[in-house]
Image (cartoon, helix red, strand yellow):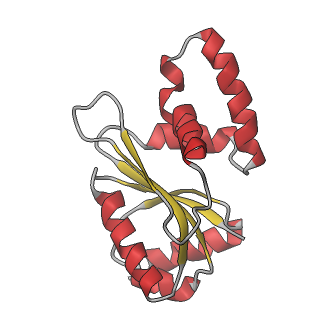
């Protein structure tokens, strides 16, 4: 089963740095990246830039349309009129089919702001203890994941250790 995880960084280049590290972990066979997307929001810009990393491990887990819909819901909804808002409501329902709740969308919108970045990862086959050890030293906030609450707490506790 694939895991969708979103990491938020306090700098516009943090997501790219983390992706480089996760890709190196994939080469070590500690995790399998099925698909990924990066959102960067440089200081002084009106909106973020998004980039999907296509076909990371053979066949990408998600299509570009999925990322486009998700990022549209997260970052562009406030600029749309009411008619488009109704259509976005339908899209929001579709995202729920993937396990992406309205709360996730709201939380991501509030946290990924100007001057920050986020890495959206779709992964599987992670050797969690080794991945966690390799990622120590990176500063990030886990916005959302479809890990169980207990798995998220263990992951965050591991990163909090010195």
| Count of marks overlaid on the render | 0
Of the 4 image quadrants, the one containing the N terminus is: bottom right
Q: Nearer the viewer, residue 65 or 154?
A: 65
Name the image quarter holding the C terminus.
bottom left
Residue at position x 22%, y 32% in the image: 44
Q: Which quadrant of the structure image shows residue 27? A: bottom left
Residue 127 percent across, percent down from the top left: 57, 86
Q: Would residue 68 be seen by someone viewing this image from the given angle? A: yes
Q: Position of residue 38 (x, y in %)?
A: 41, 52
Q: Position of residue 18 (x, y in %)?
A: 36, 67
Q: Is residue 148 above or below residue 30?
A: above
122 left or right, relative to 95: left
Q: Is residue 124 left or right of residue 138?
A: right
User: Could you tell me residue 119's position as x and y percent?
Assistant: 44, 57
Write the residue at 61% across / 68% down: 152
Q: Residue furthest left?
A: 44
Judge whether residue 120 can be spotted in this image. Answer: no
Q: Looking at the image, is 98 positioned above or below residue 123? A: above
Q: Residue at x 54, y 46 (%)?
A: 64
């Amino acid at each position: 089963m694939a895991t969708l995880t979103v990491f938020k960084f306090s700098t516009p280049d943090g997501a790219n740095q983390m992706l480089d590290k996760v890709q190196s972990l994939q080469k070590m066979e500690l995790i399998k990246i099925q698909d990924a997307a990066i959102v960067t929001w440089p200081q002084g810009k009106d909106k973020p830039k998004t980039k999907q990393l296509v076909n990371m491990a053979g066949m990408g887990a998600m299509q570009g349309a999925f990322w486009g819909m998700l990022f549209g819901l997260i970052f562009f909804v406030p600029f749309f009129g009411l008619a488009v808002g109704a259509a976005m409501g339908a899209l929001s329902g579709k995202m729920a089919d993937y396990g992406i709740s309205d709360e996730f969308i709201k939380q991501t919108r509030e946290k990924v702001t100007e001057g920050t970045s986020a890495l959206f990862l779709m992964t599987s086959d992670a050797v969690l203890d080794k991945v966690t050890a390799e990622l120590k030293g990176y500063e990030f906030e886990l916005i959302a994941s479809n890990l169980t609450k207990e798995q998220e707490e263990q992951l965050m506790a591991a990163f909090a250790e010195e």
